[in-house]
Image (cartoon, grey):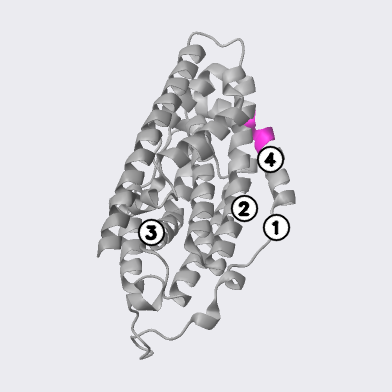
Amino acid sequence: MRIATADTVRWLVELEATAEELMNRHLASAREWFPYQYVPWSLGRDFDGPLDGEPRHPGQSALSPALRSALVVNLLTEDNLPAYHWIIGAQTSRDGAWGAWLHQWTAEEDRHASALRGYLHAARAVDPVALERARTAHLGTGAAPEPEGVLGLVAYAAVQELATRVSHRNAGRLGGDPVCDRLLARIAQDENLHMVFYRELLRAALELDADQVLVTLDETVRGFAMPGQGMPGFGRMAVEVAVAGVYDPRVHHDEVLVPLLRALRVHDLAGLGPAGEPARDRIAAHVEQLDARATRFVERRARTLAVRARHAGSA
């Protein structure tokens, strides 16, 4: 069990009213939806096993390998909900506005996994045995990011929720399957509202102590990693997803970090102290380095894809 520090208690108290206001705004903005309505049940049929159905084989799905990897990564990430629930509850509170948000967020995130798994099974898009084994292995590790303190959690969640929204949306656009696109777009709407909750908490914290928030934000953006790092086969799937343009350094720079920092007006903050100014400078340097790294990645990817295309054309 974590012991609450004075700093944790301070931020829980000072941001409680904002959390309650944002929770109420979220409830007013969120639209109720039902996972079963987004699953193409008409495509489904019995699998092999106790029901003596048809075994799944790769030819039953026209989805590209990159989209399959993106869907599996996204689903296994959503499956790890128990770990995230525990971490958020341990860093914040299960009472008051914080607790209300935790339980609401958990309920909304759980339906993402339900809908994604239903789609993958009905469409026979991936090997269901391998998927279940990967889920069990990933959950069995208990691996999940553990940001430090309330500010660390809020900063990480603001980045991660936006990254997840972008990943879902880009995967849907890649696939060429309107059913998959519709489902991922709907999930992305939830993730966007979740991001707004954490981003606005971060904005409120900036008004209270910009120096401490910038130090935390600096540590967050420089050390950020998506929560799927511990899942089986993540390295290979992440490469496929990046090569396909679903989520890569350019996407992380252009569609996540830059928009978030701009929304928070980090570069416009005045009156920073001896901790805040260097932290902001480090953030700016990191974003610049990421931009350069993203450019190199995109150039290498273009060369690789061109070589593949030439080999395919000559085959």
Vertical arrangement, residue 17 with respect to residue 276, above or below: below
Secondary structure category for the residue under label 4: helix
Label 4 sits on residue = 22
Residue 138 % position (x, y): 33, 57
Residue 15 % position (x, y): 63, 31
Are the residues at dot 2 and dot 4 in contact (C-beta closer than 8 Å)? no
Vertical arrangement, residue 26 with respect to residue 56, above or below: above
Quote the CA–CA distance across marks 1 and 2. Answer: 9 Å
View extreme (bottom): residue: 52
Label 3 sits on residue = 66
Q: Main secondary structure of the magenta part?
A: helix
Secondary structure category for the residue under label 3: helix
Quote the CA–CA distance across marks 2 and 4. Answer: 16 Å
Tell me the kind of residue under disc 1: Arg
Whether residue 122 is visible: yes
Quote the CA–CA distance across marks 1 and 4. Answer: 16 Å
Tell me the kind of residue under disc 4: Leu
Between 107 and 286, which is closer to the camera in this rendering? 286
Quote the CA–CA distance across marks 3 and 4. Answer: 36 Å
Tell me the kind of residue under disc 3: Ala
Q: Which of marks 1 and 2 is in front?
A: 2
Answer few, some or many: residues within 10 Å of disc 1's Cα (few below 14, many 20 plus, some between 14 and 19).
few
Between 16 and 255, which is closer to the camera in this rendering? 255
